[in-house]
Image (spheres, rainbow, N blue to C red):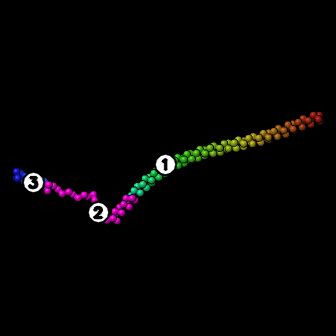
Amino acid sequence: MKNLLTFLFVLFSYFVFSQEQCKPDTNQICFPSKVGKQILLDLNELDNLRKLKILTEQEISNLEQKVVAQDTIISKLEQKDVYSQIIIESVKEKYNLVEEDNKDLRKKIKRTELKSTIIEIVSGAVLTTITLLQIFK
C-alpha cells in the first residue's frame, strides 16, 4: 500500500509539475505617464475629428442639395429667358409687319389723295368748260 501511495504521489506530482507555465498577460503594456497622456490626448483628438468628419459630410451633402436646387432654378431661368427671347422676336416681327402695313397704307392714301386731286381738277375743268360754254353760247 505504501508503494501504491508513493507511486500515486509521484505520478500526481509528475502531472502537476509537468504542466506548462502560465504565460504572462500580454494585454498589459507598461509605458511612461507622459506617453499615456499623449495617447489619451490623441484619442480625444481622434474622437473630435470623427465628429467633425460626420458634420463635414452632412454639410457637404446639404451643399450638394443646394447646388442641385440652384441648378434646377438656373435651368428654369434659362428656359424662361429663351421663352422671353422668342416673345421679343415675335413682338419685333409684329411691329415690323405693322410698320410695313402702315407704309403701304400711307402710299395708298397718297395715291388716293393724288387721284382725288386729279379728279377734282379734271371735274373742275370740265365744269368750268361746260359752264363757260353754256354762258357764251
Q: CA distance from mark 2 to mark 1?
A: 51 Å
- Frontmost residue, 104 versus 132: 104
One can see residue 121 in this view: yes
Q: Amino acid at mark 1?
A: Gln
Q: Looking at the picture, how far across and down is residue 131, in whole percent?
A: 91, 35
| Residue 110 shown left or right of residue 45 in the figure | right
Quadrant for residue 134, please give it: top right
Label 2: state its secondary structure: loop
- Frontmost residue, 135 versus 89: 89
Q: Residue furthest front?
A: 1
Q: Residue at x 21, y 57 (%)?
A: 23
Q: Looking at the picture, how far across and down is residue 13, in whole percent?
A: 12, 55
Mark 3 sits on what residue?
A: 9
Q: CA distance from mark 3 to mark 2?
A: 41 Å
Quadrant for residue 32, please give it: bottom left
Mark 1 sits on what residue?
A: 65
The magenta stretch spans residue 35: yes
Label 1: state its secondary structure: helix
The magenta stretch spans residue 126: no
Q: Looking at the picture, how far across and down is residue 26, in whole percent?
A: 25, 58
Q: Residue furthest right?
A: 136
Q: Which residues are magenta?
A: 16-45
